Image (cartoon, helix red, strand yellow):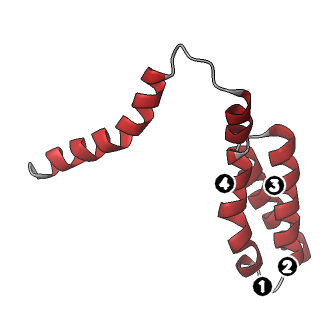
Amino acid sequence: MNSLIPVILGMAAVTYGPRLIPFLLMTHKQVPRRLDAFLKCIPVAAIGALIIPGVFSATPDMPLAAGSGMVFTMIIGLWRGGIIIPVLGSVAVTCLILFFAG
């Protein structure tokens, strides 16, 4: 058990370091507009990478449910941004369609 503590602390440092260094270096600098626009596209790309591969294999008997969840995610993700609400909403929409149609 005692040999796990240095491993856990090392993993915490390696995980936290790449997040802390840019924060400390970029505190008083303005991010260029093009970079800011690029960074704002990352949540939409992450949603696509997480959801689209599993959409068509999650409910093979009911592709309408999976497709409607994907459409909901695209609309809410592009309209409101973020990642949590679109993903949870798509799960809810898919479950509701499966519940009422199945």
Q: In the picture shown, does residue 2 fall above or below 30?
A: below
Q: In the picture shown, does residue 28 fall above or below 101?
A: above
Q: Are marks 2 and 4 in contact (CB under 8 Å)?
A: no
Q: In the picture shown, does residue 65 fall above or below 27?
A: below
N-terminal label among 4 and 1: 4
- Dot 1 falls on a residue whose secondary structure is loop
Where, by quadrant of the figure, is residue 41 drawn?
top right
| Residue at image mark 3 | 73
N-terminal label among 4 and 3: 4
N-terminal label among 2 and 4: 4
Inter-mark Cα distance, 2 to 1: 6 Å
| Residue at image mark 1 | 60
Q: Residue at x 69, y 32 (%)?
A: 36
Inter-mark Cα distance, 2 to 4: 22 Å
- How many neighbours does mark 3 have within 10 angstroms: few (below 14), some (14-19), or many (20 or more)? many
Task: Tell me residue 44's x, y (percent).
Answer: 74, 50
- How many neighbours does mark 2 have within 10 angstroms: few (below 14), some (14-19), or many (20 or more)? some
N-terminal label among 2 and 3: 2
Nearest to the eye among marks 4 and 3: give it.
4
- How many neighbours does mark 1 have within 10 angstroms: few (below 14), some (14-19), or many (20 or more)? few
| Residue at image mark 4 | 46
| Residue at image mark 2 | 63
Locate the C terminus by quadrant: bottom right
Q: Are marks 2 and 1 in contact (CB under 8 Å)?
A: yes
Spot the residue most to the left.
2
- Dot 3 falls on a residue whose secondary structure is helix
- Dot 2 falls on a residue whose secondary structure is helix
Nearest to the eye among marks 2 and 4: give it.
4
Task: Tell me residue 10's x, y (percent).
Answer: 23, 44
Amino acid residing under circle 4? Ala
